[in-house]
Amino acid sequence: MRMRKPMGMRKAAPKGRTCRSFNFGTGSAFLAWFGGAGFLLSRYSSLWVWLGLGIAIVSGLVGAAVVFWFVAKVLMASERDLDPADYDPIGALGRASSVIRAGGTGEMIYSQQGSRRSVAARSEDGAEIPRERK
């Protein structure tokens, strides 16, 4: 007898970031373009109502498509999934920015993910750590 996976587990999830085609931005763009085109067509045109409605819907879809394209191709082009290990300060190399007294705490400055960060630090054995020591 062959075991089958449930329907939802057959396909693997896509890797990387995905942008859903209907989101808040595209919905807002559709409403704005649909409303604007509908207003202009009803106010300044003598088109038949159903033709004007159709043109307004198409206009809204085009506006939503433009916003979706901009978000997917321009804004999300360089996005990547975050890895918690990239932001873990344990094991990061840095330098003591001030003297860390015996049994006390001080400050350590280190670089991680392209930015300079500072954290409280102390020695593992309680010994003094001089300034600028790596």
Image (spheres, rainbow, N blue to C red):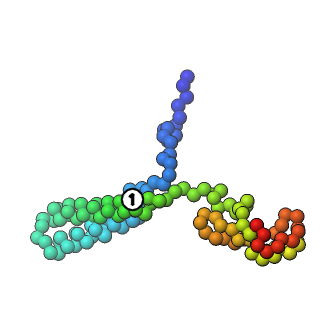
Q: Residue 102 location, x and y as percent?
A: 88, 72
Q: Residue at x 63, y 58 (%)?
A: 86
**Quarter location, residue 23:** bottom left
From the viewer's perspective, tell me whether residue 9 is left or right of residue 73. right
> Is residue 57 visible to us here?
no
Q: Is residue 128 visible?
A: yes
Quadrant holding the C terminus = bottom right
- Can you name the residue that lies furthest to the left here? 46
The number of discs equals 1
Single out the residue that lies furthest toward the top: 1
Tell me residue 9's x, y (percent).
52, 40
The 10 Å Cα crowd at callout 1, few under 14, some 14 to 19, many 20 or more, is few
Q: Quadrant of residue 50?
A: bottom left
Describe residue 72's horizontal placement relative to residue 83 as left or right. Answer: left
* Nearer the observer, 98 or 37: 98
Residue 116 position within the rendered picture, expressed as x and y whole percent measured from the top left: 64, 70
Q: Does residue 106 appear left or right of residue 72 in this picture?
A: right
Q: Nearer the viewer, residue 97 or 74?
A: 97
Q: Position of residue 38 (x, y in %)?
A: 22, 69
The quadrant of the image that shows the N terminus is: top right
Please name the amino acid that badge 1 sits on.
Lys
- In this view, 3 is above or below 109: above
Disc 1: which residue: 73
- At 44% across and 59% down in the image, what residue appears? 77
Residue visible at 50% across and 42% down? Answer: 12
Side (left or right) of 17 relative to 72 = right
Q: Residue at x 32, y 62 (%)?
A: 66
